[in-house]
Amino acid sequence: MASISSRRLSKELMEIKNDGCPVGINLVNADDFSTWLFTIEVMGDSLYQNEQFTLQFRFDQQYPISSPAVQFVVTEGRQAPVHPHVYSNGHICASILGNEWSPVLSVIAVCVTLQSMLASCKEKHRPIDNDRYVKHAPENPKKTRFHYDGEFTV
Amino acid sequence: MSTPTARRRTSLLNDLFDRKAPSINDLRVRECYICRQEERYDDAPEKRREWVHPCKCKLIAHQSCLMNSITRSTNQAKCPQCGYEYQIQRNLTFLTSSLLFRIGDTIFQAMGTSFLATSAVGLVTFTAVSVLAVGTGYGAIAVREYFGSGLSDLLLTDDPTNWHVGHHLLLCLTPLRLVSPFMNLGTFTPLFFIWPSIPPRSVREQLARESNGVDGAFPTNPSKKQPWPPGLKTFGFIVAGTSIVYNRALTRFSEWVLDMKQPEPRGLFRGLTFRREFRRQEGPDGAEQEAVLQLQREVPEEPDTPFANLNGVTQYPNISMILGLLKPFIASGMGHLLYVGAQHSSNLRFVLGIRDSSIAPLYTSPKLVPELLFDNIWYWRYYTERVVEEMDPVWIRNSVGLGLFIIVKDCVHLFHLWLTKRELASRRLKNRDFSGVDLKGLDLIRPVSTSVSST
């Protein structure tokens, strides 16, 4: 009996294949039900014009009851976008990835939300505690307890 | 029987008429927002699951999916879309009974924790108390050996309930003081001053009881006070003074014998700090730091003296520890020897304060406590003073014996050091001649021609 996460993820994958991704979002890799890769670009006039970023989703057995681990990929020359809520190791401080996650959200919904988060950015800078966080950051961003005003505790 | 479709139409019509709102079972296709599985209204019965519509918007879910979501993770029990708080039904009987059990569990848990805590504390206390008890026992034995059974039985007794707090403290610390590197008389000095001025209650009562049965004259005039032997406290001062003087004399004497300047008086901690400073001086040169790793209680080395190793060679800490602990027994043994020796010399007897057995002491029998004075503290003080005066002063000969022993031991030690020093001084490196060396390279007084072979 397939677990709840694989059934749900196969449903989502089917929808992506049938309905396509929203503009600026592209599925790169969804071979298994543990890690998916997307690229996202911010459309229109924004600070991130012509920049493409790679987003990685990691699912556990309890998806969608537990949130996926989402981060920007920073290996092989790729950079994380310079944004007040994005750390230089790719970890993202977003409420929908933490305490505001609910099963009604989906992978596409997360991509769209992050896209609009980047689009609405007024000033490109790293978070204030970027260096301190990156030094002691865990490998999985879900292990960090972000306080959603930019601060964090590990 | 009406078909399901007909039944549905009828129920809808009925609802319209009854103005009742549709419920979750009226939907044609239901999709759970959590697992995204769909179910049609005309699916076979075995594929149907229990559904719930718990909020005000259009989101619906399987009962099991939603309960899972709420209980398994930190998701809040409210709708993510419309924010309506889910209302959960509970079975009250199960709830109350499980609550009761939870209360019982918490009580037992608290009891268990407190038990563990008290037993841990109890264990630590027990260990400490037993260590103290051993120390105190040793102290009591030491005092008994050193001061003689007469005095101990009269004023201290073997029963700890008769002791004051100060006694307990002093006695339990005795082993430590004996072991510390002061092999001199000074250790016992405080013990001269701890004797109470009157016997404890049980001894008093016993003396009073025994005196009831015996008739006797109450001595009106005490024997006249002699300057020698001195009282207990006076003798204590003498011992203290002697030990200080002796220590100074010993230091000077050993310096003279060994021709070496001894460093500051050895203290337990002073030796340690010297070592640490010594180590710091050699800091920059990393290689030498390894050499000075142990912190010993010995006299630290003089960096300048060629005989720096002298004391390190001859100090054996374990021996001094054992000797320290055996001090009271050594003292008592020496005292016995002196006693035996004193039988043959009246001068020795005088010095040691041993009385001739021919003179009957006035207080051999514990009589002569008049009934009127059982509770009079002044009388008891007087009584004790007299008794102690008349008692065989074991402590005097023990102290003298211990002193002699210490003198002998120090002399032997100094002799050992002196011998070692002489041996070190006599060491010489052996000389060899220049056979086997190329003679042309040597600058000789009378140059040897190359044809002559070397001797």
Image (cartoon, coloured by chain):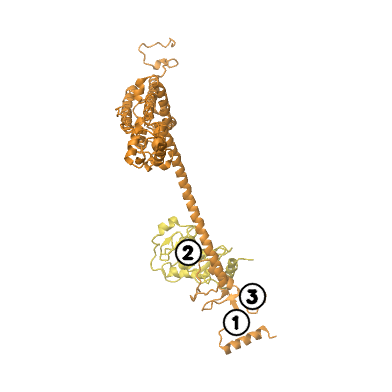
Amino acid at circle 3? Arg
- Is residue B260 something that shows in the picture? no
Label 2 sits on a secondary structure element that is strand
Residue located at (37% from left, 12% from top): B447
Q: CA distance from mark 2 to mark 3?
A: 43 Å
Question: Are the residues tagged 2 and 3 within 8 Å (C-beta)?
Answer: no
Which amino acid type is marked by label 1?
A: Asp
Give the residue drawn at x 60%, y 78%.
B29
Question: Nearer the observer, disc 2 or disc 3?
Answer: 3
Asked if residue A20 is positioned above or below residue B274 in the image, the reply reads below
In the displayed structure, would residue B369 be above or below residue B65? above
Q: Colour of chain B?
A: orange
Say which colour chain A has: yellow
Of all chains, the one bearing label 1 is: B
The N terminus of chain B lies in which quarter of the figure?
bottom right
Label 1 sits on residue: B26
Q: Residue furthest right?
A: B1
B239, B212: nearer the viewer = B212
